[in-house]
Image: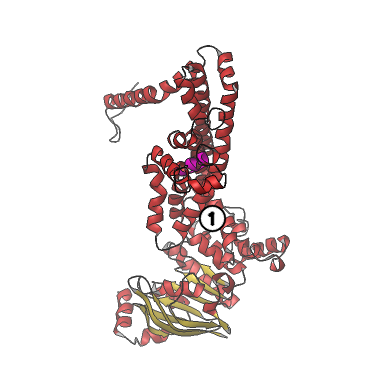
Amino acid sequence: MSRGPRRSTEDHPLLRVTLGVVAVGFIGLFLVLPLTMVFSEALSRGLAAALAAIEDPDALAAVRLTGIVAAVAVPLNAVFGIAASWAITKFDFCGKGLLTTLIDLPFSVSPVVSGLIYVLIFGLQGWLGATLRDWDFKVIFALPGIVLATMFVTFPFVARELIPLMADQGREEEEAAASLGASGLQTLLRVTLPNIKWGLLYGVLLCNARAMGEFGAVSVVSGHIRGLTNTMPLHVEVLYNDYQFVGAFAVASLLALLAIVTLFLKSFLEWRYADEIAATHRH
Amino acid sequence: MSLVVESIAKRFERFPALNGVSFTAPQGAFVALLGPSGSGKTTLLRILGGLEFSDEGSVHFDDLNWLSLPARERRAGFVFQNYALFRHMTVAQNIAFGLSVRPRRNRPTRHAIAKRVEELLALVQLDGLGKRYPSQLSGGQRQRVALARALAIEPRMLLLDEPFGALDAKVRKELRGWLRALHERLGLTTIFVTHDQEEAFALADLVAIMNKGKIEQYGTPEDVRSAPKTRFVAEFLDSAAV
């Protein structure tokens, strides 16, 4: 293979090979290998055993609970994310910087602490504990607490995705819509939302993946009641601690599959709608 | 039936943008707000369009207390410097927007809107481009779509913010003549902002030279050019003549 002189942007072949090997090795060691292990452990006693572990009533209950939690937390966080990014990027108001910082709080707080906050507020010994007991409304060690903890942890995903996008798009299109006679709601529905739909979809996908996979915060508020307040990640832990490795890895592979499907969907959307996504950025 | 702007003042957080601006323009006049950047001309235009609010002063137009109307009830056709076309809509949808958001009882039928869009496309010489997206158009074409969109709402006045600012010199000259011709035809009161005095003098019936939030001189291009009232005006005119 004959080659001309090296272009200035081309690195030394040895350097390129080294970098390539390091990158591939890293990905292989830390991402692909563990993922393969999850599936191979799940299938170590055959497909039937893995399926049986998933069909166990407690496992099914965990899958159902995770689904319910995500179904409540993700739409609420999507609505919140849209509202917050709309307010932050399209209006000027006092306390805007504070709000922007607060949105990031769940990213910087340890999930365990997030869970504990809710125990302190809603738990029996907490601020609202007595009141809630009088109303016979259980938050901690029940579904509402799990939903709250999940929401707290996944709070920033949609807003984080939308704020830079909407800031980049500016306010001019909204101003144009107003000068053309559109009401606030019409502007939101016909101008703002269509411009952010792809960013919103990414945000929701990531938010959903995290909502289903959240362990720390949920672990604190759930109480680990099998078949009742165990989400999928918690169920994996319970099974693992019981030395039921096939079961633990079988449920874990469901979660891993979810992650793969999320990534696949994201890549598919990026590929399928590349033009439209590019067009929603400032031209 | 004229535009009367009286003592408009506007203060941003740290600096005053407008320090009591007054002028009167007869119905159908073509007025240029000319001045260096930071002179307050765009702020004045945005106040007229309802996109910014003045702290003091009043504006009357056609017996309307103009500033008491919210932006969407003013029917002021605003053309933005960067056009602000709706990027996810086709050219035709962009132009139809102002008609399609009207309350049901005032909204033309779908057929009537489509017909109006065709007329406007012809008016701005973009026949056949209705199905394109803004990103598929040249700068000059986008400019004309923005104008057609503003005209679709049957505006009471036209407000143009640096309408040719983002275009190259050749297209700019072509569009200038075309815009003047369109103005003669439609007879709409038009205010436009520019920092290019050649453009202002070539297009406008009346020129307001602005500096530091005030109008230094207001008059016909001939008057302003032959008898600059203040030192700033004389220097400003000189600087571009060199």
The colour scheme used here is: secondary structure
Query: Residue A111: x and y, percent?
Result: 41, 38
Q: Any magenta on residue A149?
A: yes
Residue at disc 1, secondary structure = helix
Chain letter of disc 1 in the image: A
User: Foreground: B24 or A93?
Assistant: A93
User: Foreground: B127 or A283?
Assistant: A283
- Does residue B97 appear left or right of residue A247 in this picture? right
From the image, tell me which residue sits under label 1: A192
Query: Looking at the rendering, which quadrant does residue B92 occupy?
Result: bottom right
User: Foreground: A227 or A39?
Assistant: A227
Tell me where the magenta segment starts and ends, as one range.
Answer: A145-152
**Which amino acid type is marked by label 1?**
Thr
Query: Residue A277: x and y, percent?
Result: 51, 45
User: Foreground: A124 or B177?
Assistant: A124
Q: How many numbered circles does the render carry?
A: 1
Q: Is residue A24 visible?
A: yes
Query: Residue B134: x and y, percent?
Result: 54, 55
Query: Looking at the rendering, which quadrant does residue A69 occupy?
Result: top right
Q: Any magenta on residue A64?
A: no
Q: Main secondary structure of the magenta part?
A: helix
